[in-house]
Image (spheres, grey):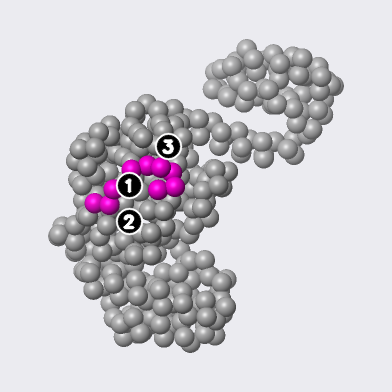
Amino acid sequence: MLVEHGASVYVGDHVHDVEGARAAGAVSVSVLTGGCTEQELRDAGTDVVLHDLTELPAWLDAHVLDVRLAALEAELRSYGSVLVAYSGGADSAFLLAAAVRALGADRVGAATAYSDSLPQSERSPALDLAASLGVRVFTPETHEMDREGYRANAGDRCYFCKAELLDVLWPLGEEHGFARVATGTNADDAVAGFRPGIRAAAERGAATPLRDAGLTKEQIRLASRRWDLPTWDKPAAACLSSRVAFGIEVSPFRLARVERAEAGVRAALDAAGIDVRNVRVRDVGDRGRLEVDADRLAEVDACPAVLEAVRDAGFEEAEVDRHGFRSGSMNELLPEPEQFR
């Protein structure tokens, strides 16, 4: 029955349960709440002994993570060499570190594309981490702004951005002898609904080892912390274009204004002693809409300098989003069919 149902873990409290797990090629987890002693269970060949079932969830979480990390390592080893599309965020930083572990630094490259959509504040930390891993670092320029579909900023803008990125990275990878180009797409991204960028990358043959190994965002952060990566708790940092409401043309002016506004907001928050993890200034025309962590809204409301920083950056009007920060909030403004196209 274990084989028929594809069980990979079998939990029991008797030596016969251990025998069943062994016969099915499953991991044997034994608990000491039955009639067998720990020594009897270990003599029977169990893999794990728990005092009772309350210890099972923590063990299972760690086990699943270990299994997926092993799958990731095997996948990366199969590449031989890889150029990682590396933004410096939690996902791509973890992928870069995993590739170094699997292949060695000499077979791994980090490519951080420079364009108007990458905040200046993200560049140095990304380069520093890549350098600390000992990999070759490349900083090619991408020109997504030259693509009409990107500037038009309809719901599929990310398609044109990712298309430009992969169209630049594949020749770069071939020039420097890398067998594959990989992105940091994770398992959560694959089921998140509206992700036109994933489609563009797939069409161009980009590898997605984190997704293929089933690693979720939470698991990536847990593993990053285990490996002492400084990005383990780094807040999400989408490109600057993600701040511009769909239907408003993306331009270098708008992206620079958003970047100035967010820097000004963070400076005002720091000066006021307000600890905020996530900050986004959304460009919805002449109005800058500020998103911060929902549990900090009252403190932000009491600090006029915060919205003043948004206006000083060049927005005629500024407001605080009462729903607080949430990733992908611009998708809420899309027509329903387009969100999931």
First of labels 1, 2 by sequence position: 1
Task: For mark 1, give the secondary structure.
Answer: strand
Q: Circle 2: is it few (<14), some (14-19), or many (20+) Cα within 10 Å?
A: some
Question: Which residue is rendered at x = 71% and y = 16% of the image?
Answer: 45
Query: Which amino acid, mark 1?
Result: Val
- Gap between marks 1 and 2 measured at Cα: 35 Å
Q: Relative to 318, is 127 above or below?
A: above
Whichever of labels 3 and 2 marks the residue nearer the N terminus, that label is 3
Of the 4 image quadrants, the one containing the N terminus is top right
Q: Amino acid at mark 2?
A: Gln
Residue matched to label 2: 339
Q: Nearer the viewer, residue 224 or 45?
A: 224
Residue situated in front as seen by the camera: 191 or 239: 239
Identified at 37% across, 76% down, the residue is 261
Q: Residue at x 27, y 43 (%)?
A: 201
- Counting from the top left corner in percent of width and height, residue 329 is at 39, 64
Q: Quadrant of residue 82?
A: top left
